[in-house]
Amino acid sequence: MKSKRIKIAIQKKGRLNKPSNEFLASLGLNFPADDKKLTLACKNAPINLVKVRDDDIPKYVGGGAVDFGIVGLDVVEESQEKVTVVKRLGFAKCKMVIAIPRISKLKTISALEGKKIATSYPNILRAFLKKNKIRSTIVVVQGSVELAPYLKTADAVCDITQTGKTLREFDLIPIRTILRSEAILIGNPIKKGVKYNFTQKIS
């Protein structure tokens, strides 16, 4: 009987695509070099690679459509999907911060009570505000979150940053880090029979 091929989802394009491929290659997994194909069959292991949007990876893993996925911890936390963290991968490190305009008088988290905070991560922000008993209005923005204070649509922002360059460009300063993120390997907690050793390199 032919064994079932394991499916691993990675980001189709973006900052996690290249390091995800490099991580798999470091395990000795040999996939064809084809940027146009969305699915690739490994040449030396029973594994298929599936390339999708990063936001969809937790959903596909949690729903059992794929067995494993490589995605940012921030994306998993925001998705609220039930998945298992198999391994922290140590690349694509970044942090989620709450930032305010440099000229703002709101220097502390508690000062955001009753204020507006723009973000693309409403679930993570909502959980943080609830934990800290702060009642703020969450303004959901898809795109350039940092523009919100400039456009007077929010008093602060909650966003991912790696170097802080974009925050500085909009004259924003972080006042609290609420999540430290990196790329992680996730699996479906229900499909316990599906296993693969992601620490041992194929010789």
Image (cartoon, rainbow, N blue to C red):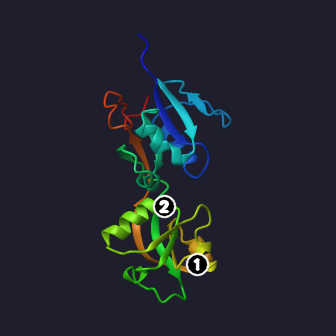
At x 45% / y 65%, what residue is drawn?
A: 95
Q: Residue at x 40, y 51 (%)?
A: 80
Q: Is residue 201 above or below residue 96?
A: above
For mark 2, give the secondary structure. Answer: loop
Percent coordinates x, y for residue 108 in the rendering? 40, 83
Pick out the residue farthest to the top.
1
Residue 109 coordinates in the image, percent (x, y): 39, 79
Q: Quadrant of the N terminus?
A: top left
Image location (x, y in percent) of residue 110: 37, 81
Q: Residues within 10 Å of mark 1 (few under 14, many from 20)?
A: many
Give the position of the C terminus as an image quadrant: top left
Q: Nearer the viewer, residue 38 or 150?
A: 150
N-term mark: 1 or 2: 2
Kind of residue indicated by mark 2: Tyr
Residue drawn at 34 percent across, 31 percent down: 191
Residue in view at x 59 percent, y 74 percent: 148
Q: Report the disc number at residue 121.
A: 2
Q: How far apart, in angstroms, are the residues tagged by discs 1 and 2?
A: 17 Å
Residue 63 occupies which quadrant of the picture? top left
- Could you tell me which secondary element the residue under label 1 belongs to? helix
Residue 170, located in which quarter of the rendered image? bottom right
Image mark for residue 149? 1
| Amino acid type for the residue under numbered disc 1 | Pro
Residue density around tag 2, few if under 14, some if 14–19, many if 20 or more, within 10 Å? many
Can you say whether 148 is above or below 199 in the image? below
Q: Looking at the picture, how far across and down is residue 101, in whole percent?
A: 54, 82
Indicate left or right for 20 with 85 as reference.
right
* Of 139 and 197, the residue lying toward us: 139
Specify the farthest residue to the right.
Answer: 36
Seen from the viewer's position, the closer of residues 194 and 111 is: 111
- Is 39 left or right of 57, judged from the image as shown? right
